[in-house]
Image: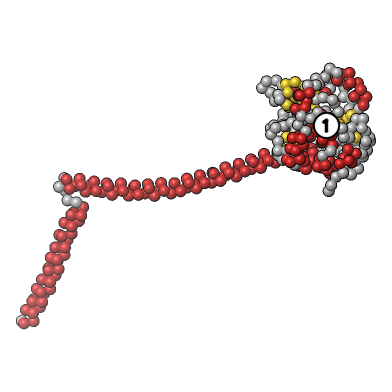
Amino acid sequence: MPVDINRLTEGWLELESDPGLFTLLLEDFGVKGVQVEEIYDLQKSLEGPVYGFIFLFRWIEERRSRRKVVEQDESFVKDEEIVNNIFFAQQVVPNSCATHALLSVLLNCPNIHLGTTLSRLKMHTSGMCPENKGWAIGNTPELACAHNSHAMPQAKRRQDKNTGVSTGRFTGEAFHFVSYVPINGRLFELDGLKPYPMDHGPWKEHEEWTEQFRRVITDRLGMATGEQLQDIRFNLMAVVPDRRLAISHKLTMLKTNRQIVLEALQQLVKLSHQDGNTEKNSHDSDKEKQCEKRHKTEDENGLPTKTEMEESSSIPTINVERNNDSAVVMDESISTISSGKTESR
């Protein structure tokens, strides 16, 4: 469906702070291998790499006014070359801070498959100032369509061109997304409502950048300074590699290992049968060799072999049997003669 570019800046809708929704939005952008998950415990260690954090908080104009003096001392990066060489975009379109927060993470990570739309956006905005990058986001039809497709039907549109902040769905309260990303060994806070990115410095040696982020966000929430929290309505999400890919890779590895084990077992069974046959043949061969050796020894000692002994022992038996037969015949003859003599008398 074609989009009227002239109406893009008037049509962005606010989004829920939901990790599943943000993951779907990433997929609609064309990003692969990335998901968004919610963080419930700041003290709990995160598993695996983290591309960046997205922090949602309630926007209070009075608090913003109080912070104007403090922001003068904050670590803004004002070097034009540095600012233009990272992806930092000022939010010039109302209700687009959710997409801004995602892009601030994605387009500052070198090892993410961005897809066609975001790759083209990154290339075309390279070297641009933050304001022009903001207009480039607001005037990209693919981003606007993907963004609005995940908005709640009841979402209200608010044309606050002074702040460009997302509003609550029903109360008119404003909530805002900011990103925390590691860039060139330093932790940056990228807030589209501020004129410059903020540099929170490097993290300590032998620690992950997430530890530096934990310290920064803890201070911001007032947990470290003891400041009483005036509003606990905030949300923290992490942009991480897609867990499904890791699980799928692990499953593939398990299947591969299983196949290797099965093939190894089959080889072992085959070798076992071969060894059994070899052992049997070896046993028969040894038995034959022992017989040959015994026969050879008997021949050398002049002793009759077993065969000769059997033959010699059978001869007397045959003679005896023959003699016995002869004796029987003779006895019969004598008996006949005797009977004849008796009859003649």
Residue nearer the viewer, 332 or 198: 198
Q: Which residue lies furthest to the bottom in this view?
A: 344
User: Residue 45 occupies which quadrant of the picture?
Assistant: top right
- Where in the figure is residue 299, as x and y percent of width and height? 17, 48
Horizontal side, residue 93 vs residue 186: left or right: right
User: Residue 158 occupies which quadrant of the picture?
Assistant: top right
- Where in the figure is residue 84, as x and y percent of width and height? 77, 27
Position of residue 341 relative to residue 199, above or below, is: below
Please report the residue visible at 19 percent of the width from the left and 51 percent of the height from the top. Answer: 305
Q: Which residue lies furthest to the left in this view?
A: 345
Pointer 1 local density, CA inside 10 Å: few below 14, some 14–19, many at least 20: some
User: Residue 185 occupies which quadrant of the picture?
Assistant: top right
Amino acid at circle 1: Asn
Residue 38 visible in image: no
Residue nearer the viewer, 4 or 297: 4
Please report the residue visible at 78 percent of the width from the left and 25 percent of the height from the top. Answer: 83
Q: Residue furthest top?
A: 73
Residue 48 visible in image: yes
Residue nearer the viewer, 288 or 200: 200
Please report the residue visible at 12 percent of the width from the left and 71 percent of the height from the top. Answer: 329
- Where in the figure is residue 146, as x and y percent of width and height? 81, 42
- Where in the figure is residue 248, as x and y percent of width and height? 66, 42
* Viewport quadrant of the C terminus: bottom left
Horizontal side, residue 172 vs residue 49: left or right: right
Please report the residue visible at 18 percent of the width from the left and 54 percent of the height from the top. Answer: 309
Secondary element under disc 1, as helix, strand or loop, is: helix
Residue beneath label 1, please?
132
